[in-house]
Amino acid sequence: MVGKPERQVAVFGAGYIGLVTGACLAELGHRVVVRDIDPEKVALLRSGDVPIYEPGLGDMIARNKERLTFTLDLGETLDGAEIAYVCVDTPPSASGDADLSRIWSVVKSLEGATHLKAVVVKSTVPVGTGARVRAALDAAGLAHVGYAANPEFTAEGRAVTDFMRPDRIVIGASDEATAQLITDLHHGVEGPVVVMDVRSAEMVKLASNALLATKISFINEIATLCEKTGADVEEVARAVGLDHRLGPHFLRPGIGWGGSCFPKDSEALRQLASNTGYHLQLLSAVIEVNNLQKRRAIQQLKDELGTLAGMRVALLGLTFKPGTDDMREATSTVLASRLLAEGAEVRCWDPMARPGEVEPWVSTTRHATPEEAMAGADAAVVVTEWPQLKEVDWARAAAAMRRPVLFDGRNLLDPAGMRALGYTYMGVGRP
Ligand code: UGA
């Protein structure tokens, strides 16, 4: 922190984003108080536990415990704070628009915090939210407090690295002093700072996620066409990605994207457009392709097995991607619901998932290993590409299945090798 002052930061929300933001700002040398309204979560954090799984986060929190505290108390959070970071969640509302109620309750709680220098929103919000927060701050006598949108681009499973070494730090601020304050706050982070107006910064976030989701849905449609024409999508994606104008990233075909961001943010962007009277045609198709992708997998299994009624199907991997315990909008949930609706028996394995006592999971059985889940099954589906699946003794697993039908929803395994072991192997877009 050579030449840059250490700041006192109040972080609102101890979810994925709040915890990563708080821990990384503390790592940069700032004093950080993270506030959450969930007493259990705060108690856990205070006792040194981390309520979510994110590589490197636990160590970072532990190493910065002198500068990083957790509280339920608003007074303690704001006491001496110079910058308030808003990291609360913005789930979809009944209309598909983002539900901003948690943002508003934080903004309300800032009334009287006249010592603040800036309020920064990190949560993903519709374009125009910053202007509304600005108006609310003005009305609360905080016109002298700066405002900035500082969207996050961190992916779960690599959030700490993404924060500390980002492709870019986007700061949307209405005045130069606030832009400089937030730029300085990131001193020590390795990545270019891009300063712009608030609305554009809000749009960068939504546009980035929508474009990433578009790439995946695009390659998934090409995968379907590969199946119909005998081409191999893995070869196609590899060569397409070598074009430096296109790039190799987010061209991995599979049984659909999920998670807490893409589904919610793409729908929020679509609704944002609808609210202005404009229909985002491309994005609507991207979402539709993703919904179909999950259902196609079930149809393919049904075609192979004749019926799903009475069939025992093992789902291997439940989380929306490997390296996380997050089950939000996971493809596995759609698959399990559809399989149960077709009368199948669902068994599952995942090293991290905590699906909870809810449908469809209460109607499934959990197993400690992939092999155990596959024993006696009529089909198995690779839903999440956990590295542990590479270590499975697939020959033994095939012998223990009632019918060795394998749907590799992430193209994780070698088709020829699996067929040689006796599997009826189906991948995504592979001959
Ligand atoms: C995503 C973005 O990648 C982050 O930049 C962004 O900050 C974050 O959303 C957010 O808005 O907070 P995340 O949802 O953690 O991050 O996960 P990704 O790694 O992007 O994967 C999303 C989904 O796409 C997963 O279901 C994954 O399996 C799927 N995917 C990803 C594919 O099917 N193919 C690919 O090539 C890449």
Image (tube, helix red, strand yellow):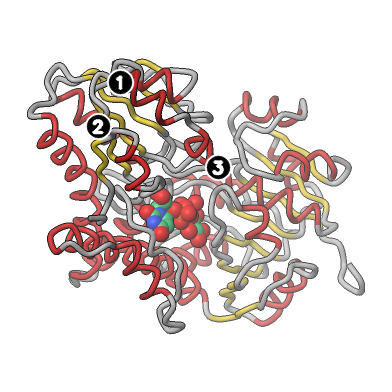
**Circle 3/circle 1 CB separation < 8 Å:** no
Residue 403: x %, y % from top left = 23, 24
Residue 35: x %, y % from top left = 67, 40
Looking at marks 3 and 1 on the same chain, the residue that comes earlier in the sequence is marked by 3
- Nearer mark to the viewer, of 3 and 2: 2
Callout 1 secondary element: loop
Answer whether residue 199 is visible to the viewer in this image: yes
Q: Quadrant of ligand 1?
A: bottom left
Give, as a three-letter code, the residue at label 3.
Gly
**Circle 3/circle 2 CB separation < 8 Å:** no
Drawn side of residue 56 relative to residue 171, left or right: right
In the figure, residue 145 lies in which quadrant? bottom right
Callout 2 secondary element: strand
Callout 2: CB less than 8 Å from ligand 1: no
Q: Which residue position is annotated with label 1?
A: 401
In the figure, residue 234 lies in which quadrant? bottom left
- The residue sitting at the front extreme is 420
Q: Residues within 10 Å of mark 3 (few under 14, many from 20)?
A: some
Callout 3 secondary element: loop
In the rendered structure, find residue 323 and report the number of the disc placed on it: 3
Does residue 92 sit above or below 388 in this rendering? below
Q: Which residue position is annotated with label 2?
A: 405
